[in-house]
Image (cartoon, rainbow, N blue to C red):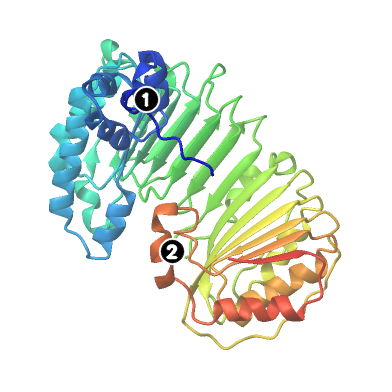
Amino acid sequence: MDKTVLPSDKSIKEDRINQLPDEMLIFVLSFLMPKEAFRTSVLSFRWKCLCPFLPRSLDFDGLYTMWEIEKEKKSLIFERKKFLQWVNGTLKSCRVSTIDEFRVCFQFDDGSKSHVDEWIDFAISKGVKRPELDFTATNPFKDASNFYRFPNERFTSDKSFIKSLTSLTLKYIRVTGELLEHFLSNCPLLERLHVDNSKDLVNLKIYSSSLKLKYLHIIRCLEFKSVEINAPNLESFGYVGNEIRLHIHFAPRLLDVRIGGMYSHPIYYAFGSLSSYLYQLESLTLDVHSYTYDGVEFLEFQNLTKLKHLKVTVATNEGSSLLGLIPLIEAAPFLHKFVFELILSKINFPKKARKVKKYPNEHLKEVEIVGFAGRAIDIQLVIYLLISAINLEKIIVNHYAPYIVGIPRLENVRTTVKFEGAREAAKRLKEKLLTRAEFVIM
């Protein structure tokens, strides 16, 4: 008869984790989020002493709480106070000499300026490489005038240059073009610049033969008027907003472009400035708002001979048509993956019958449809893709809203943002269409 061997008292008391050297414990704890890592301090006095030295990355993410506030399940005033206490408490106990990343994601405005200014000072003092301030507002139109103002004076004096800066991300923050140009001129390692919803950004000029900048995205800055680019290392450029004066004078390494309009503003004007670079693009992302009777139209498009990845997001209504995307798809003969996101309004225009010629696409391997509604508007597009992509290997049909897909913490609210009957429509497509491709329904 087998006997269960119980551990001795000595082995029970033996704590092998605490026998590890400090360097090993700090390495293990560094894989946790800051909030989780500091919770481990209750395990022992030794762990409590180590925690202030562990974070090379400080990520204060309040995205899920912001979702709850937007749905009126939580109070912004109460949750903001809790968030301030969390950040201030963590920074007060932090003893590391340097940090690589400092990220804050929550709604703050000028009313919290003294706190945020101190956070920025802290990040500067630690030689931060990748700061990200995402102060996403639940109502950006109402709160825009009260957005947090980025403290120019902290960066325009000689002592405040951030020589270690490699990336800068500012969302829902008031920052001027002059200050961004100052960063570009005085941060020799800066490779990434992302600005989203800045009311004070109007014009931007980027001129430097030695500039390391590889990524420049300007998103939904409503007062933005013009940008001039001379950037020898630029690989990714993105602009979403109203029509602007776009001048790309020199960008020989440009491989990835995102262009989007807002409130039915066109995007076609941008292709004139980009015409010299379209042939070399490997990735293209387009955001289109179209609420017209004819729907989305790409009647002619320059050949995209190197394009491998195409993503199109369309905000439109049920009565429109998506078949106008076909010329764009066919302009990329070597397209490997096509991602389509649909943001659908239930405003119904009379449907217009359309016929399209179907050309075989030999290279398209993967298609992903996000926001599938199971209506005539997107079923037509799916059928076209299944028929024309003769070597298609996989199609993914996701009936959840594009703005939450890919955000794990919002998975539990997905059931509230999908079209009724969409999943059943996807199942019927899967059953009826004869295709060798893997058909995945999310």
What amino acid type should be assigned to the residue bearing mark 2?
Tyr
| Residue occupied by mark 1 | 11
What amino acid type should be assigned to the residue bearing mark 1?
Ser
Secondary structure type for disc 1: helix
x and y, in percent, of residue 127 in the image: 34, 16
x and y, in percent, of residue 431 in the image: 73, 79
Which one is in front, 417 or 242?
417
Checking the image for residue 163, the label placed there is none
Binning the other alpha carbons within 10 Å of mark 1 as few (below 14), some (14 to 19) or many (20 upward) gives few
Secondary structure type for disc 2: loop
x and y, in percent, of residue 377 in the image: 61, 78
> Which of marks 1 and 2 precedes in the sequence?
1
Q: Residue 272, can we see it?
A: yes
Residue sitting at x 22%, y 54% = 143
**Quadrant where the N terminus is found in the figure:** top right
| Residue occupied by mark 2 | 263
